[in-house]
Amino acid sequence: MTSKSVVNASVKSDNQLNFDFPYQGGSDGYIQLRKKDGSTDAMVSISKGQFVISVTNFNIRARFDSAAPVKYSCSMANDGSSDVVFINDAKGFISKVNQKHNCVNS
């Protein structure tokens, strides 16, 4: 534990994601923003399940309000967590989040 501050913001999806066994039963999706050690991160996480990321590109699509979906490349967590991905263009994603009312990951 250190005296450095970490600022987090998180929003839970209004609906649930439905996966096959062994993650059936509904999974909550989250968009998380974090400011830590002078850098800002944007993440997408799920309560049950895993993101399967290969060495090649991993992308998510996010739609803000009624605009066309935007593709964002993502990276896995440094600690190997498979329930979260980091959006590589965090600054661009956060800029869109600040301008819009609704965001849909597709």
Image: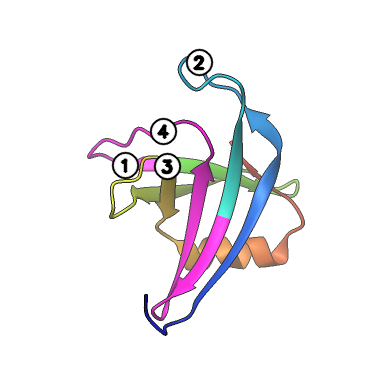
Counting residues from the N terminus, which is met first, the one under dot 3 or under dot 2?
2
Residue at 54% across / 38% down in the picture? 47
* Left or right placement of residue 82 versus residue 91 in this view: left
Separation of disc 1 and disc 2 at Cα? 24 Å
Cα–Cα span, label 3 and label 2: 21 Å
Amino acid identity at mark 3: Asn
Amino acid carrying label 1: it is: Asn
Residue 104 versus residue 50: which sits nearer the camera? 50
Q: Is residue 41 magenta?
A: yes
| Residue 75 shown left or right of residue 106 in the figure | left
Secondary structure of the residue carrying tag 1 is loop
The disc labelled 2 sits on which kind of residue?
Asp
Where is residue 51 drawn, in percent x and y? Answer: 40, 35
Numbered mark located on residue 20 in the image: 2
Q: Bin the neighbour count of mark 1 within 10 Å (Cα to Cα): few under 14, some 14-19, many 20 and up.
A: few
Count of numbered marks: 4
Return the residue found at the far bottom: 3
Which residue position holds label 1? 57
Identified at 50% across, 45% down, the residue is 45
Q: Residue furthest top?
A: 21
Q: Distance of mark 1 from mark 4, alpha carbons?
A: 16 Å
Please report contact status of discs 3 and 2: CB closer than 8 Å, yes or no: no
Quadrant location of the C terminus in the rendered image: top right
Query: What type is the residue that disc 4 sits on?
Result: Gln
Q: What range is drawn magenta here?
A: 32-58
Q: Give the Cα distance between marks 2 and 4.
A: 12 Å
Q: Would you identify the image quadrant in which residue 2 lies?
A: bottom left
Relative to 72, residue 93 above or below: below
Which residue position is annotated with label 4? 50
- Tags 3 and 1 touching, CB below 8 Å: yes
Q: Which mark is residue 59?
A: 3
Residue at the limit of the structure toward the front, as seen here: 1
